[in-house]
Amino acid sequence: MNRPTIAQTLDDAARALARAGVDTPELDAELLLAHALGQDRTWLMAHPEQALTSGQQLAFRAMLDRRTAREPLAYITGERWFYDILLHVTPAVLIPRPETEALVERALSWLQDHPRAVVADIGAGSGAIALAVAKHAPPDVRIYATDISAAALDVARANARRLGLAPRVIFLPGDLLAPLPEPVNLLLANPPYVAETHRPQLMPEVAAYEPAAALFSGPAGLDHLRRLLAQAPGFLRAGGMILLEIGSDQGRAVTEIARRHFPHANIHLHQDLAGLDRLLEITLTL
């Protein structure tokens, strides 16, 4: 019996993924097969006539079945690139998104001028923000990372150890800012901000598989942002800054909330590459 080649396997898998409604069937087929074979996509493209062993076929079929059921690719492979670090991810954590990299960029820019700052990443999840900042921040920057989910903190700690960044981040269990042992100079957060009313509109990968507690925040998606901003004045030092990722339709509402708690601060909205509001920046005066 002829064994299927890489080219044939990819072609069949891409068709199956397309029928299942996956947005990027060819890319996902390549990433899944590369992971199953322990290679990269470049190797696949260079060996289209390579035949798969029976064990490789079984391993790939199991992964493909999960993806056609719309399980996120990152949970199947167990990894996701964010900024310039490769993170381990599980269904206990939200899958890091490229748009959150803008928050890291802005934080690192600010830290170049504040090389002894104390930083807190609130709702750390996989550790994406805290660890990307830890890798590139000046050496005297101290970083806390909090999360209410013990399972998420386990993932974040494991990522820190694997990346050699464990000495740079102190992980603290608890709700929002409550675990912080001291005020900080820079507060970072990608909190839950999806409105419950938007749940039916989400892709199956998100609605059915990612942790609801890391996604949804009340009827308008503002509950966590309200609580965080209400707590923040007691935890932010003079001259400090807050950076929050927000929903694209929340700019005006979140700015109004921020203004109530920080009436004398400089408040600015940053847009993403699509021109949509994505980042709220609050800077306190000295």
Image (cartoon, rainbow, N blue to C red):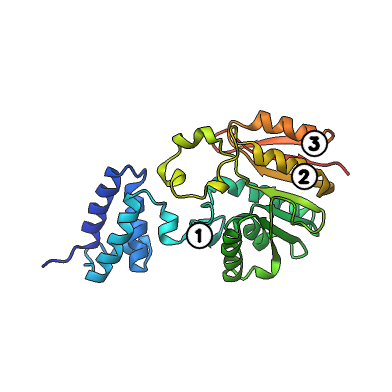
Work out whether residue 204 or residue 53 is closer to the camera in this orientation and state it.
204
- Mark number displayed over residue 261: 3
Q: Which residue is mark 1?
A: 89
Q: Is residue 208 above or below residue 137?
A: above
- Residue 76's spot in the image, x, y percent? 40, 59
Say which mark, if any, is on residue 231. 2
Residue type, mark 2 in image: Gln
Callout 1 environment at 10 Å: few (<14), some (14 to 19), or many (20+)?
A: many
| Foreground label between 3 and 2 | 2
Residue 127: horizontal and vertical position, in percent?
A: 61, 58
**Residue 53 in sight:** no
Labels in figure, total = 3
Residue 155 occupies quadrant: bottom right
Q: CA distance from mark 1 to mark 2?
A: 29 Å
Task: Report the disc number at residue 156.
Answer: none
Quarter where residue 247 is shown: top right
- Residue name at image x 68 percent, y 40 percent: 225
Query: How far across and down, in percent of the image, does residue 152 sit?
Result: 58, 59
**Observer-nearest residue: 62 or 9?**
62
For the residue pair 67 and 91, the one nearer the viewer reads as 91
- Identity, as a three-letter code, of the amino acid under mark 1: Val
